[in-house]
Image (tube, rainbow, N blue to C red):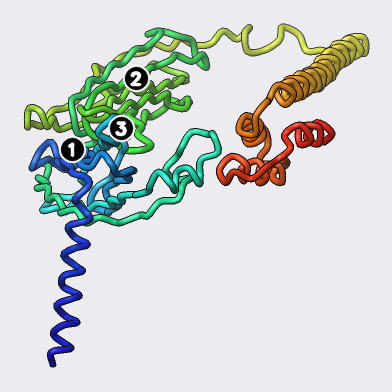
């Protein structure tokens, strides 16, 4: 019985020792910028973590766990080094998708290493946490709870937006298009994908260009700027109906409607002379020959340009390779020490020069002897 109690006590002590070790060399600040938000409203998640033990060498990884209750956008991931150690800052935007209490969980990993392990991995290149030998520990973080409020009504947009409409002409001829431009701008939640604000119009053929959408994320949410362009074609007078989009402003806490004014387009009958030739006659053989000559000339010019581009590109690559090879040989000749030659070979082609790199690493970090002059000659012969 005493033996069992002793083992249990040992396990408990080891657990508490591990828990104390997990947070003894770092501290953090984790917060949401608001405790409640509407569905679709942006919420800023901030995580700042820093070393409390300057003797440690730490790297940090952090991200909110994926969930069908919200979507996530990374705003910033920044690491700063100082005498006190590493400080990492992470900022995300969360967009809740459904009302109710939403728990936000996290993945937080602390990567620990030592000076000795750094020296073993580093061959002169910049140190990267993912490329060196570290002990990775998944540290638990308490979940954050967000109260998500239901929208007063299902709307197309969440945020503060404005809508503009512009028609290039208010009169045209039959079968001659007029061009309509709609511009939607604002800040708030993420607008729905595939948004097309123009309603259907009877008797009007609508040709839509691909929307030009610009999106930028910051602490205010999504900065959205989209331009929708349409060509409208009709045979008689028509009306461009008002474009209406319902929205909800989280800053004002109210519903509103974006609405353009209706626009009339007068359509005159097309002139018959613009639709049909004045006389019907077959194309002459001379016109056919001239047309073939023109097409042959266009194809010849295109072929010449294509071949010239290929030759220029090959010549440029050959010159670039020669210059690069000459520069590499010059650097090899000027490398006086094993460490300088090691850095050069690792930077140039670590796979090709792997046997030399192994010998040079043994010389630099383990003190083994190596004939640098002989090795330089062998490298230049490759």
Q: Which residue is mark 1?
A: 43
Circle 1 — which element? strand
Place of residue 330 in the rendered image (x, y in percent of width and height, measured from the top left): 74, 20
Find residue 83 and report its image quarter: top left
- Return the disc, 2 or 1, that comes first in the chain's sequence: 1
What residue is drawn where x is 14% and y is 50%?
A: 144
> Real-space Cα distance between discs 3 and 1?
14 Å
Q: Which residue is mark 2?
A: 182
- Return the disc, 2 or 3, that comes first in the chain's sequence: 3
> Real-space Cα distance between discs 2 and 3?
32 Å
- Of badges 2 and 1, nearer the viewer stands 1
Marks 3 and 1: CB-CB under 8 Å?
Answer: no
- Of badges 2 and 3, nearer the viewer stands 3
- Against 205, residue 29 (above or below) is below
Find residue 297 and report its image quarter: top right
> Real-space Cα distance between discs 2 and 1?
29 Å
Circle 3 — which element? strand
Q: Is residue 271 left or right of residue 40?
A: right
- Of badges 3 and 1, nearer the viewer stands 3
Q: Residues within 10 Å of mark 3 (few under 14, many from 20)?
A: few
Of 381 and 306, nearer the camera is 381
Image mark for residue 76: 3
Of 325 and 102, nearer the camera is 325
What residue is drawn where x is 39% and y is 17%?
A: 180
Place of residue 277 in the rendered image (x, y in percent of width and height, measured from the top left): 71, 10
Place of residue 241 in the rendered image (x, y in percent of width and height, measured from the top left): 29, 23
- Against 251, residue 287 (above or below) is above
- Return the disc, 3 or 1, that comes first in the chain's sequence: 1
Q: Is residue 22 in view from this perspective?
A: yes
């Amino acid at each position: 019985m005493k033996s069992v109690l002793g083992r249990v006590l040992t396990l408990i002590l080891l657990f508490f020792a591990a828990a104390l070790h997990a947070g003894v060399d770092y501290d953090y600040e984790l917060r949401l910028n608001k405790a409640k938000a509407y569905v679709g409203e942006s919420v800023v998640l901030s995580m700042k973590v820093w070393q409390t033990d300057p003797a440690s060498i730490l790297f940090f990884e952090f991200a909110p766990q994926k969930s069908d209750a919200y979507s996530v956008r990374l705003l910033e991931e920044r690491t700063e080094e100082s005498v006190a150690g590493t400080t990492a800052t992470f900022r995300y935007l969360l967009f809740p998708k459904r009302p109710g209490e939403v728990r936000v969980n996290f993945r937080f990993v602390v990567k620990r290493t030592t000076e000795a392990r750094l020296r073993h991995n580093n061959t002169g290149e910049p140190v990267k946490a993912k490329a060196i030998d570290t002990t990775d520990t998944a540290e638990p973080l308490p979940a954050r709870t967000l109260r998500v409020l239901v929208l007063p009504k299902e709307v197309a947009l969440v945020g503060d937006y404005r809508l503009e409409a512009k028609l290039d002409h208010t009169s045209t001829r039959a079968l001659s298009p007029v061009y309509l431009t709609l511009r939607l701008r604002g800040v708030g939640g993420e607008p729905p994908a595939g948004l097309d604000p123009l309603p259907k119009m009877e008797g009007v053929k609508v040709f839509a260009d691909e929307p030009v959408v610009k999106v930028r994320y910051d602490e205010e949410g999504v900065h959205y700027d989209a331009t929708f362009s349409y060509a409208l074609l009709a045979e008689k007078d028509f009306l461009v109906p008002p474009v209406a989009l319902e929205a909800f402003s989280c800053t004002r806490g109210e519903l509103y409607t974006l609405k353009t004014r209706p626009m009339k387009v007068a359509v005159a009958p097309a002139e018959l002379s613009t639709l049909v030739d004045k006389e019907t006659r077959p194309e002459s053989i001379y016109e056919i020959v001239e047309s073939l000559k023109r097409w042959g000339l266009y194809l010849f010019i295109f072929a010449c340009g294509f071949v010239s581009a290929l030759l220029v590109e090959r010549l440029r690559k050959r010159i670039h390779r020669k210059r690069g090879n000459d520069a590499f040989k010059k650097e090899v000749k000027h490398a006086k020490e094993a460490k300088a030659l090691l850095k050069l070979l690792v930077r140039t082609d670590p796979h090709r020069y792997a046997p030399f790199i192994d010998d040079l690493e043994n010389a630099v970090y383990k003190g083994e002897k190596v004939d640098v002059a002989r090795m330089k000659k062998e490298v230049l012969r490759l």
